Image (cartoon, helix red, strand yellow):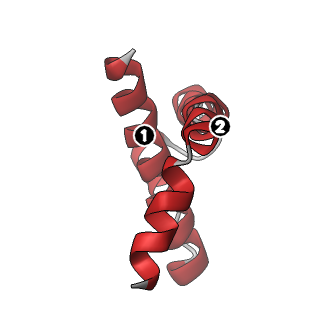
Amino acid sequence: MKFLNILTLLLIIIGGVNWGLVGAANFDLVAAIFGAGSMLSRLVYIAVGLSALYQIIPFMQAMNRGEVAAEADLTRR
């Protein structure tokens, strides 16, 4: 389970960086590496999307344990 969490977080980071580049410089890094509209780039986009959906589970578990609220309180001090 820990490996899956790390893998999905890594894919979400890749997706976030890619969207940042698209927004800031109109540059799609995934498309530049794998080819615009190629099957490989589409698989990366699908993997990033599925990773984001998967990460809802640990996020909700952390919310139920109060971990997210505790982190938010620490940043206010």
Residue 60, horizontal then vertical, whole percent: 65, 37
Q: Height in image: 68 above or below 8?
A: below
Amino acid type assigned to the residue bearing label 1 in the image: Leu
Residue named by callout 2 = 60
Residue 50, horizontal then vertical, whole percent: 63, 29
User: Does residue 31 appear in this view?
Assistant: no
Look at the numbered discs 1 and 2 and tell me whether their residues touch, using CB distance below 8 Å.
Answer: no
The one of 69 and 8 positioned closer to us in this rendering: 69
Residue drawn at (59%, 32%), measured in percent from left and top? Answer: 61
Is 17 on the left or on the right of 47, as rendered? Answer: left
Residue 53 got which mark? none
Residue drawn at (41%, 20%), measured in percent from left and top? Answer: 4
Kind of element beneath mark 2: helix
Earlier-in-chain disc, 1 versus 2: 1
Mark 1 vs mark 2: give the one in front: 2
Is 69 on the left or on the right of 70, as rendered? Answer: right
Kind of element beneath mark 1: helix
Q: Height in image: 76 above or below 66?
A: below
Residue named by callout 1 = 9
Q: Height in image: 62 above or below 27?
A: above
Q: Residues within 10 Å of mark 1 (few under 14, many from 20)?
A: some
Q: Give the quadrant of the C terminus.
A: bottom left
Q: CA distance from mark 1 to mark 2?
A: 15 Å
Residue drawn at (45%, 57%), measured in percent from left and top? Answer: 29
Amino acid type assigned to the residue bearing label 2 in the image: Met
Q: Residues within 10 Å of mark 2 (few under 14, many from 20)?
A: few
The one of 19 and 42 positioned closer to us in this rendering: 19
Residue drawn at (53%, 54%), measured in percent from left and top? Answer: 68
The one of 2 and 66 positioned closer to us in this rendering: 66
Q: Give the quadrant of the N terminus.
A: top left
